[in-house]
Amino acid sequence: MAKPMLFSCTACGAAHSKWAGRCDACGAWNTIVEEAPLSAGPGARALTAKGRSIPLGTLATSDAPPPRTASALSEFDRTLGGGLVEGSAILVGGDPGIGKSTLLLQAAAAFARAGLSCLYLSGEEASAQIRMRAQRLGLSDAPVRLGTETNLRDILTTLDAERPDLAVIDSIQTLWSDTVESAPGSVSQVRASAHELVSFAKRRGTSVILVGHVTKEGQIAGPRVVEHMVDTVLYFEGERGHQFRILRAVKNRFGAADEIGVFEMTGAGLAEVHNPSALFLSERGQASPGSAVFAGIEGTRPVLTEIQALVTPSTLGTPRRTVVGLDSGRLSTILAVLEARCAVPFAGLDVFLNVAGGMKVTEPAADLAVAAALLSAREDVALPPECVVFGEISLSGALRPVGQTENRLKEARKLGFTTAIAPARSKIGGGEGMRLREMADLTAFVGDMFGAG
Ligand code: TYD
Ligand code: MG
């Protein structure tokens, strides 16, 4: 007989038969914890015993799409794909202290004011604390019902009796079920609680929003195991020390993934930012060397961000490569292409790269803007201030056109830019009022902007 699986990884959920320091499935260290084995119920039979056959249907549907409710918190609705879908299960993950409880209290109040019956159940804070926060946010009069509980059985009984349209559970890590032996926050507890709540959502048509903390230490189970169970996974992110917060859909069965909502943390809670480009560019002063404006796309919305680079002589044997808001592997690739294809060396130079405002950029279309910022910093030559940049760089040094050129140009024009530097063959429409400078490859770009590389 096979041994029961007793250990699982809190990062990726892989099951292991024995403890190890490193999970060989995802490579994370110190994330494997012991779990109570799944025991068969008293009525369990071998799988070879006959079950009942499942009724099958066709793909055609006459059903209307599931009803959605929009609230006054439109950035939240946008991230969900245009409002809250009835009976959907949503996970909101994020670092502790980033503002999840604040966001969801505001969301619960917004949906309650839009006519949904809303429950806010907290296992983390006392009622008095939540009421004080609600008062500070000006939400005391919103018809949200508040409860503090960590026992899953009591929560399910309450939900069954109340049948709310929306239940917010803050947080999934504090819940415990008396049917599972391990401590609250362990993978088995988190998995069991999430499973029960998601099944409840599907059975009763109640939308459930679960809050999950992500910690690096792995003491609390990451909500990774829950991601597979829910319909929508949103991450609330932001740099500490910056007031901007981005709500990003990383999985959405009811809308576009990668959609973002932008908020600003203020003294009176989270304020919506409807024009993020203006905000991210607001700190930009005079045109200075090392700065390039990237015309990017987040989900369905164009967002302009400033990419900043600083290049200084290094005193270290291995020069520094410091990146904030971009992938460091991507920086290494772009530096290598500049060295190998354009003969612009960065050896002996420290390179610092940063996306202004605490935004994270993951699009390959940012490559050319990164290269532009790096070259501008290295040559100490400012790019023209009225110019945006986008395009993907291939390892050969060629520039690849990217999608949604039209949206990028429209947004740039709206913010007062008049020129765009883009790969050749970028299909153009809606480019009125914008001058397009098309570059075939990186060498042409270097020659054009900074003289012969
Ligand atoms: P919180 O929502 O408790 O974070 P989380 O639930 O993700 O742990 O918010 C944490 C931070 O937000 C806290 O450090 C204070 C700050 N904050 C404000 O700046 N303004 C506000 O109006 C509120 C309610 C919180
Ligand atoms: Mg909280």
Image (tube, grey):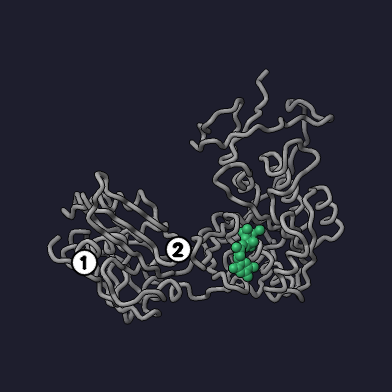
**Residue neighbourhood size for the residue with mark 1, other residues' Cα within 10 Å, grouped as few (<14), some (14–19), many (≥20):** some
Q: Residue at the far right: name it.
A: 161
Q: Nearer the viewer, residue 17 or 229?
A: 17
Image coordinates for residue 67, horizontal then vertical, percent:
69, 66
Q: Which mark is residue 380?
A: 1
Q: Residue at the far front: name it.
A: 315
**Of marks 1 and 2, the one in the foreground:** 1
Residue type for callout 2: Met
Q: Nearer the viewer, residue 206 or 318?
A: 318
Read off the residue under disc 2: 359
Q: Nearer the viewer, residue 172 or 220?
A: 220
Secondary structure category for the residue under label 2: loop
Residue type for callout 1: Asp
Name the residue located 51 percent from the left edge and 38 percent from the top edge: 28
Image coordinates for residue 154, horizontal then vertical, percent:
84, 51
Secondary structure category for the residue under label 1: loop
Q: In this rendering, is residue 223 above or below 232?
A: above
**Residue neighbourhood size for the residue with mark 2, other residues' Cα within 10 Å, grouped as few (<14), some (14–19), many (≥20):** many
Image coordinates for residue 295, horizontal then vertical, percent:
37, 68
> What quarter of the picture does the C terminus occupy?
bottom left
Q: Tell me which image quadrant ligand 2 sits in.
A: bottom right
